[in-house]
Amino acid sequence: METIQADVAIIGAGGAGLRAAIALAASGAELKIALVSKVYPMRSHTCAAEGGAAGVIKADDSLDHHFNDTVGGGDWLCDQDAVDYLVQEAPRELLQLEHWGCPWSREPDGSVAVRPFGGMKKQRTWFAADKSGFHILHTLFQTSLRYPTIERFDEYYATDLIVDDGRCWGFTAIEMRSGRMRRFEAPAVIIAGGGAGRMFPFTTNGAIKTGDGMALAYRAGVPLKDMEFVQYHPTGLPSTGTLLTEACRGEGGVLLNRHGRRFLQDYGMGPETPLGKPVLKTMELGPRDRVSQAFWHEQKKGNAVSTQWGDAMLLDMRHLGEKKIDERLPLVRDMSISYMGVDPVKDPVPVRPVVHYMMGGIHTDIRAATPLAGLYAAGECACVSINGANRLGSNSLTELLVFGRRAALSAVEYLFAGRAARNETALEALAEAAQERIRALFQRTGGTESVAGLRKEMMQTMEQHAGIYRSGEGLAEACTRLAGLRRRYAGIELHDKTNVYNTDLIQVLELGSMLDCAEAVAASAAARRESRGAHQRLDFAERDDANFLRHSLAYYGAADAPRIGYLDVVITRSQPGVRDYSGNHE
Amino acid sequence: MSERRVELEVLRYNPETDREPRFQRYSIRCPEEWVVLDALNHVKETADPTLSYRWSCHMAVCGSCGMMIDGEPKLACKSFLRDYPGVIRIEPLAHFPIERDLVTVIDDFMAKLARVKPYLIPKQERALGEGEYRQTPAELKKFKQYTLCINCMLCYAACPEYGLIPKFIGPAAISLAHRYNQDSRDGGRREREEEIAAAEGVWECSFAGACSEVCPEHVDPASALQQVKIASTVDWYKEHLMPWLKK
């Protein structure tokens, strides 16, 4: 098997992976960097983020405000030392992007503009119209082209980490163009593989977000943390799940039920604010978990709007006017017209909550280090944890920059702390074993299952039992069904047994990743007998700090169900309190 | 939701098993509201798992799903079935080698992108501690449109010059160079000009304008190309006829 040597190998070339690669290349350490991704960097899902990235910059704001908004928004499940690091580093990282050319929107005087976002007490979201993630991704990708020490391996699908003697030594990956297996040998590995929203049927996530990075670490024995916390974004298009950014509401858009009532005032987020004059941290600028949950209740009460794609609410932006919509929300207008046939300048747009983001992920410490020596993780695939039980909009783009860089710095420290002796024979055997598993998949005959069939059942299970509101009974059912699906997964036979760009093979492997992640979600959710943030239990409706002010850790159980452990939350200066979005939070 | 029957005629090519590309017919029933990408996904899920193509975001921003649809370069996620009443012919993007089925080899484009130095070369170095470069909304507007390129390469598939002269750097890469040249923070135009004003650079463009017509993000590469030509010409005159203007 051909071996590719590097000092640091990165899996995933989206925002976090690119940021890490640049930090490594600019570290002055003369490192050989392998940037490996199953897609070309510009295709990474960072490109779909719309609203912006949070970082304190304006005079009336403070790091404390950003800290408090984030910790309260996360229902006190965030590690507060990590949040401190995030808010401190955020302005510097966003400024760094500005210096690299990111076309941030501007104030008339030429300074960087910020916009309001949900759950944020001050305006601190840097934005580039409503294509902020797209511009961040392309700025990072284009900047990475300056550095010859970053060698890219585009369209390589990583299959297994190589772990020997308690350390990660690299991984195996399939070069999709040839179908050949390669061994990436690197004493430090950073996983930046993104989220896993595709385990649900209705999601803003692109096709590539199948949890591969999470599953790689998980199968290698690294726990997945807080996987039960799945974010529903309140405003997706019912037809396709396409995201309409929270900036729609930041700019002044309002949510209506079928009676034309701004119903959020009935769910602890009132009183109603004047139309066109959004007030921070209340009503439509409440946090995503609360807004999505409010819709669920409206639906139960029969107050939802019926569309041919099911129940919805209305996002009314008409009062913003055509000029502002075109300037601040051009993509939103374009997509509403294209995919819903509704022009937000003229009519309210039907929207409904849609799976958007995984708060949970690969367990890392504040240095972006996993418990496995030599393995780091950053971005959506990781849980550091700054998002706790509910991420605030515009913290994730900041997170992937801050912790992408942090992972790189930690990897450099690790490399310079002295290298352990490598057992070449053992590593080679591990790589051969990984190749053998793929070979066995090719050789399997008499298959009884299809990828599409199992995937559909998984998605239905997740939507039915692991959605906005959950119950112990439903989650137990989900665990049983997912375990059954995983057994049946072993009965998949490839339809396509050729080598070049075999998407049948990739989809089988992606399904395996999603099933692993889905089991971790269901098992963690079943074990958490309380309601907190995005995890709401009908049978345990209250937050229970005495028992569950703790992170869940799901450990891979191979043929068995995941084992769930717990880890204390780091609390430094904010004791758990009441999340107040009534507009009286001064 | 109204349903209809859709006939797809898809180019198939697997280098391991096919001597040359062929077309395969798929007939499906599906909602009228679907885009071509939905139809392809339906085929892959229900009829033929071997069909290969790239896609991800389904919102015209990742740039993965460029393909020829009835002979025109399009994003499959933004091509609505309702606009195609007859049999829909789907082929990989023109002017690129076929890797497999609808998947093309894009090494050439990736190399060209890197060649034009599509990153900020600061006019004036500024430390992070000094804060942001000031840039007014008017200055931003001067280049903003050229930042919107999603690298989908539809413009290369539409460009008659790229088809004839593969060395031509092409619309997207030149637009991106122009994007940085026009950025008030940037001072790297001369460096980029060495690449894009070279023989196979900007002068190959015959201003057919096809690139701008097919661009799904309205980047208007043709205008970038014209502006680069003008700027290069002015530079040439300055250098050769008015040497006293040089520093």
Image: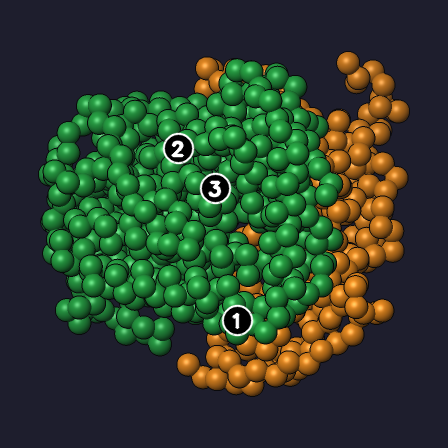
| Chain letter for the residue marked with disc 3 in the picture | A
Residue at image coords 13%, 58%: A539
Q: Residues within 10 Å of mark 1 (few under 14, many from 20)?
A: many
| Alpha-carbon span between mark 1 and mark 2 | 35 Å
Above or below, comparing residue A462 to residue A127 in the picture: below
Instruction: Locate the N terminus of chain A by quadrant.
Output: top right
Residue type at the position of mark 3: Ala
Q: Which residue is mark 3?
A: A220
Name the secondary structure under disc 3: loop
Q: Residue at x 22, y 27 (%)?
A: A571
The disc label shown at residue A364, or none: 2
**Residue tagged 1:** A450
Q: Give the amino acid type for the residue marked by disc 1 in the picture.
A: Ser
Residue B144 visible from this viewpoint: no
Left or right: where does residue A320 sit relative to residue A1?
A: left
Chain letter for green, please: A
Q: Residues within 10 Å of mark 2 (few under 14, many from 20)?
A: many
Q: Is residue A153 visible?
A: yes
Q: Tag 1, which chain?
A: A
Which is nearer the eye, B131 or B13? Answer: B13
